[in-house]
Image (tube, rainbow, N blue to C red):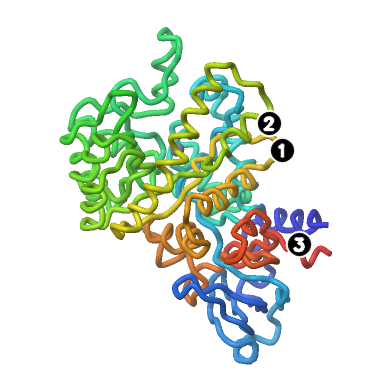
Amino acid sequence: MLRRCLVLGLLCLSTPLAVCQTNPSKATVLKAGRLLDVRTGGYLFGQAVLIEEGKIKELGSTTQVQAHAPRDATVIDLREATLLPGLIDPHAHLLVAVKPEGQPLLSAVAGMSATRRALLGARLAREDLEAGFTTARIVGHSGIDGDAALRDAINDGWVPGPRILASCRKLTPPGGQALSLNPAVAQQVLEQEFLEVGSANEARKAVRQDIYYGADFIKVVADADGRFITPDEMKAIVEEAHRSNIKVTVHATTTTGIQTAIDARVDSIEHGDDVTDEQLKSMHEAGIFLDVTEAFFGGRLRALSGKSTVLSPEDEQLLDGYEKEEAQKGPARLQRILRFGVKYAAGSDMWFDYPGKTRGQATAIMFGALHDLGMQPIDVLRATTSAAAEMIGWQDRVGAIEPGKFADIIATSGDPLQDITELERVRFVMKNGIVVRNDWHAK
Ligand SMILES: [Zn+2]
């Protein structure tokens, strides 16, 4: 049913824009059943959206918009649907897909050529887009420049996918992150995935290297198995990145790692597991975003691993411990984030080859997880649209259905403010004014 539309969408996206649309300035009118205003948190009814040259030109009553639309505008009837801004995943890993049955991340990467990995990236990007993710910030595990290349290929119309922000290699303490490799070959794998930082000078150089390879922002790992980026190194990273006008986001799970990030005035912190009240206060004051990554909350990691494998008693125990701790700490942490008024967004951190799901479908499990964590549906939506846009510095172009923004729009048939898992069943996707998917039309 949706195949035809998808195929058309893909053909369309894989062709340069000018060829795809015979008249590039041809307008589209989307007639909405209801449309979510993410700012107020309420629905607008009887609205239509006028789209020209990939951007939202006007939003208003259907009569008004139709009166302003060119005569030859394409009209898409979504009066049965709920229109929402395209989704943003600010913590994506689109160039890695690890089998859930305990395969170490880096051995998955070590067994793959850069060429094969690029093709994997093309597949995962398409799957993400089809599920409604029109923007993805890739925060590492892309090889030297896989995410930048994927971004450029998508922008050039070679392959379909979300708008991408690339970080290229993560900056890590010497030794990288999550390493359990044969030392005889470890160094080469390490250099493919990370830029090791052992001094402030190396930190500056690493930032410049990432920028050279096409990074849109810098991703730092503040803490890795008891090894840390030092305060001096973190300050050098932030100074160098901000000099080039790009943001710094930091993986930090420990109190020490989080403090180093806050003191250096990074732009955002990923995960933040052991964040203290004092640190949340400082983050609020400094306007540092917390990127909440809780896609596996509520037994979702067990559901994933249980699909394809029987765990060893040791792993079973480990998973038990993780779930018990998270069941308690996760919701409490969220309540503290809200209490201190810290700005937050939410990302998936999905890097598994999830059995039976596309990458986009797997990424979408985060919506139910965030709700189970205690986030209200409107806040889940903001964390993955308007707030995520602000965190990544793209609030002027994505994250809301507003005039002047890119026409990145999705639709569901039900009401996501009543049932957030409607976002797992996105039925219409438009990116840059081009329809990627329309299940209604395909009926
Ligand atoms: Zn991650």
Residue at 38% x, 61% y: name it.
Answer: 390
Q: Earlier in the sequence, mark 1 or mark 2?
A: 2
User: Relative to 330, does residue 411 appear above or below in the rendering?
Assistant: below
Q: Secondary structure at mark 1?
A: loop
Q: Which disc is residue 356 wearing? A: 1
Other-residue count near label 3 (Cα within 10 Å), few / some / many at <14 / 14–19 / ≥20: some
Q: Which disc is residue 439 wearing? A: 3
* Closer-to-camera residue (423/407): 423
Q: Amino acid at mark 2?
A: Lys
User: Relative to 321, does residue 6 appear above or below in the rendering?
Assistant: below
Q: Amino acid at mark 3?
A: Asp
Residue depth check, mark 1 versus mark 2: number of the one nearer the observer: 2
Residue tagged 2 = 307
Query: Of all residues shown, which one is farthest toward the left?
Result: 232
Check whether the beta carbons of the residues at disc 2 and disc 3 lie within 8 A of each other. Answer: no
Check whether the beta carbons of the residues at disc 3 and disc 1 lie within 8 A of each other. Answer: no
Check whether the beta carbons of the residues at disc 1 and disc 2 lie within 8 A of each other. Answer: yes
How far is mark 2 from mark 3, CA to CA?
Answer: 28 Å
Q: Amino acid at mark 1?
A: Gly
